[in-house]
């Protein structure tokens, strides 16, 4: 997969504002291309909720050509930032927006929330006598590792199918979720694993009736679900 466009916007709760980048990330730099590519590939390999892009107005805007890439990223970052107002339990993070193409020519566009984590590191400082003083410093804005699965985000394939990772956060106001508060999709969506289990259950009764091996039933269930996903323009995975 090749990342063709990427930009990162900062959502800073401390200053109650979002900081928008006016330029895209320099993808010619190996470190940047590698980081973004691995983040995207890890996201698509993780279990996602899938639904049609027409179910979400923000997703439609993300996949559209209504505004240029940077403007869409800015507008949607502001939308996410406003959705977080007052929700103390939802972690602060940056918003990564990408456009990409895979080896088969399929196009992807996405917005991924990079939640911060806290890490400790050393700091070289100097005292009043210009002597070196090594200190310990806390950094509260560490981005996820490229091999880490993200909690929240959306990637849209060929302007048709949304792949969404969602995590609910409970707060005094109730529950916050990326699907409901950002994508504005209220209906409960089914995960691929739930679809496979439902098909397995249906095929199990057929297997018992015709005395078929259980492992064949499990494999067939997974194949049926993923082929069905593929026929709808979604990511095809082999069993």
Image: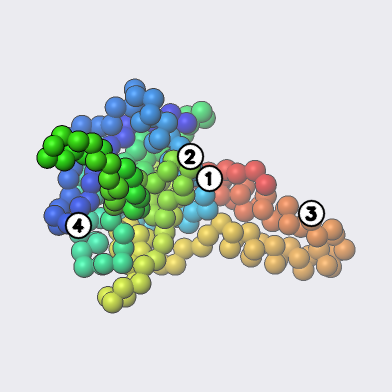
**82 relative to 44 in the view: left or right:** left
Task: Tell me the element at label 3.
Answer: helix
Badge 1 local density, few (<14 within 10 Å), some, or many (20+)?
few
Image position, residue 105 (x, y; %): 47, 29
Please say whether residue 96 is visible from this viewpoint: no
Mark before the other along the chain sequence, 1 or 3: 1
Q: CA distance from mark 2 to mark 3?
A: 30 Å
Position of residue 42 relative to residue 201, above or below, is above
Depth check, front residue: 201 or 171? 171
Depth check, front residue: 219 or 147? 147
Closer to viewer: mark 4 or mark 2: 4
Residue at 17% in and 45% down: 19
Tag 1 residue: 45
Q: CA distance from mark 3 to mark 4?
A: 52 Å
Residue at 60% in and 44% down: 237
Report the disc number at residue 41. 2
Tag 4 residue: 13
Position of residue 133 relative to residue 12, above or below, is above
Residue at 51% in and 28% down: 103
Tell me whether circle 2 and circle 1 mark residues in contact (CB < 8 Å): yes
Report the disc number at residue 216. 3
Closer to viewer: mark 1 or mark 3: 1
Image position, residue 109 (x, y; %): 37, 40
């Amino acid at each position: 997969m090749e990342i063709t466009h990427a930009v990162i916007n900062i959502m800073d709760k401390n200053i109650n504002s979002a900081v928008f980048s006016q330029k895209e990330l320099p993808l010619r730099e190996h470190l940047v291309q590698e980081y973004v590519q691995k983040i995207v590939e890890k996201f698509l390999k993780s279990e996602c909720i899938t639904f049609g892009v027409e179910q979400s107005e923000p997703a439609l805007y993300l996949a559209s050509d209504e505004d240029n890439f940077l403007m869409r990223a800015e507008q949607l970052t502001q939308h996410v930032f406003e959705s977080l107002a007052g929700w103390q339990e939802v972690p602060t993070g940056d918003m990564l927006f990408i456009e990409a193409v895979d080896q088969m020519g399929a196009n992807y566009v996405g917005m991924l929330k990079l939640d911060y984590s806290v890490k400790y590191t050393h700091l070289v400082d100097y005292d009043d006598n210009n002597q070196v003083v090594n200190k310990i410093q806390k950094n509260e804005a560490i981005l996820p590792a490229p091999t880490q699965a993200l909690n929240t985000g959306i990637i849209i394939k060929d302007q048709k199918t949304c792949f969404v990772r969602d995590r609910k956060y409970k707060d005094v106001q109730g529950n916050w979720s990326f699907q409901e508060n950002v994508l504005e999709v209220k209906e409960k969506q089914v995960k691929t694993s739930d679809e496979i289990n439902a098909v397995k259950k249906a095929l199990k009764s057929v297997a018992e009736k015709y005395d078929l091996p259980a492992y064949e039933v499990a494999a067939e269930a997974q194949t049926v679900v993923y082929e069905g996903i593929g026929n709808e323009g979604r990511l095809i995975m082999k069993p």
